[in-house]
Amino acid sequence: MKPPIHQCVIGHTFCHKCKSILEKCPTCQAEIQNTRNYAVEEVAYSLKLPSSTTEKTNGEVTAFSKIVTCPTVNCYDTYDIQTIGNHFKEKHMDFFHWNNFTIKNVYSYFNIDVLVRYGKTYIVLFDYNDTLFGICICSISGDDDCQYEVKLTTDEGKFSILSTGQKIVPFDENEHCFKCLAGACKNDDHKYRLVRKPIFKHMPTKLNRDSVNRTFNYKSLNYVVNIIDSRKVFLKELTMKRDKVFRHMYECPICKDYMLPPIHQCLSGHILCHVCKEKVEKCPSCEGKIDATRNYILEDASENVEIPCQFKSERCRVRAGVKRIASHEADCPFKSKKLCVVPEEQIE
C-alpha cells in the first residue's frame, strides 16, 4: 500500500484505491470516514528504497577488454587490462596488495599500485605537489559500486585523519597514465603526456600537506587505503534509519513511552497509547474526536518489529519486540545511572 493509507472507524486498513469503491469496511462492516493511518504512511515514506546500480544490472559487473602498456615508469610490457593484477604479481610484487595496504612516509610517495579486493582489481595512483597529497583509485571493470577510504596516521598511531566515502572512477588509460604523471610517456595519443597537472587536478582525494604536517607535528606519516563495499554501507545506513523510524513509530506522541496494544487513534489518524487515551478528551495533534478507533497494523507488528535497545551506544546489543524491549530497557545493565552527589547524611 502506498500513501494515502486509510482505515475504517474501528481500525482496519485498506488502500486509497479500495476506499474509493468501498461503502463499508470489508472486515467488520464498520463505517468508512476519512481516517488515515499516518503512522504507517510515515514508515512507507521513510523507508522508500532507491533503485541501485546493482539492481539495474542484476548484480553483474561489466568487464571491458583492452590492450594497454604497463603504467609503471620503467616497464613497457603490453597486456590485457584485465590481467594487470597477474602482471604486477609477477613483475612488480612490491606494489601489489590484497584487501588493503599501508604506505609509509607519504611525504614523498609518488607511485602506482594495484589492489585486489572483493575479487575485483583496482589501480591506485599517488601524487603530490607543493601543497597537496593526491590519491585516485580506478576500477578496471568500469563503473563500480564500491567506495574507498584513506586513513593518515603516524607510527605511534595515537592520532589519525580519516577521509571516507571517496568515489572510485573507471580506469581510463588516457587519463590515468602514471607515465604521463612521471613525464616519461611516449604515447602521442595521451592528452596529458606533456602536461601532468590535469591528472592531479582530477584526483578525487586531496589532502592539504601543510595542515596534515602541522596536525601530526611533522612526524613520519602513513597511508592506510581500504576499499569499502557501498552495498554494505547502504544496508548499514538503512538498518539505522529503519531502527529510528520504528522507534519513533511506537513512541506515544504524548507521554513518549512505548505504545503497547491496544494502540488508539483519533478519527483523523493520529495515534496515542491506551494510557493517554483515558486522560485526554480530544486529539492533541488536531483536536479531533477520540473514539474507539484502533491501529491494528501497529498492534499486530509490535512483536514482530525488532527495535534496538536505546542504550545501544553504550554497547548493549539487545534487539526485541516493543513489549520486550520496553521491559529490558527498564533494567538494562548498560543503562546510565545518575548518582546523587549529595552526601547521605545531608538528606533529610
Image (tube, helix red, strand yellow):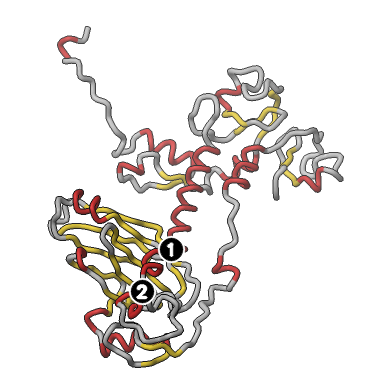
SS for callout 1? strand
Q: Residues within 10 Å of mark 1 (few under 14, many from 20)?
A: some
In percent of width and height, residue 49 lies at 58, 55
Disc 1 residue type?
Answer: Lys
**CB under 8 Å between callouts 1 and 2?**
no
Q: Residue at x 57, y 50 (%)?
A: 47
Q: Position of residue 132 (x, y in %)?
A: 29, 59
For residue 163, above or below residue 203: above
Q: Is residue 300 above or below residue 71?
A: above
Q: Residue at x 31, y 72 (%)?
A: 99
x%, y% of residue 100? Answer: 29, 70
The quarter in which the C terminus is drawn is top left
The tag on residue 117 is 2
- In the picture of the structure, the residue carrying the numbered disc 1 is 167
Whether residue 40 is situated above or below residue 340 in the rendered picture: below
Q: Residue at horizontal 48%, vertical 39%?
A: 323
Question: SS class of the residue under badge 2?
Answer: strand
In the current view of this chain or complex, which residue is farthest to the front? 194
**Near-viewer residue (224 or 205):** 205
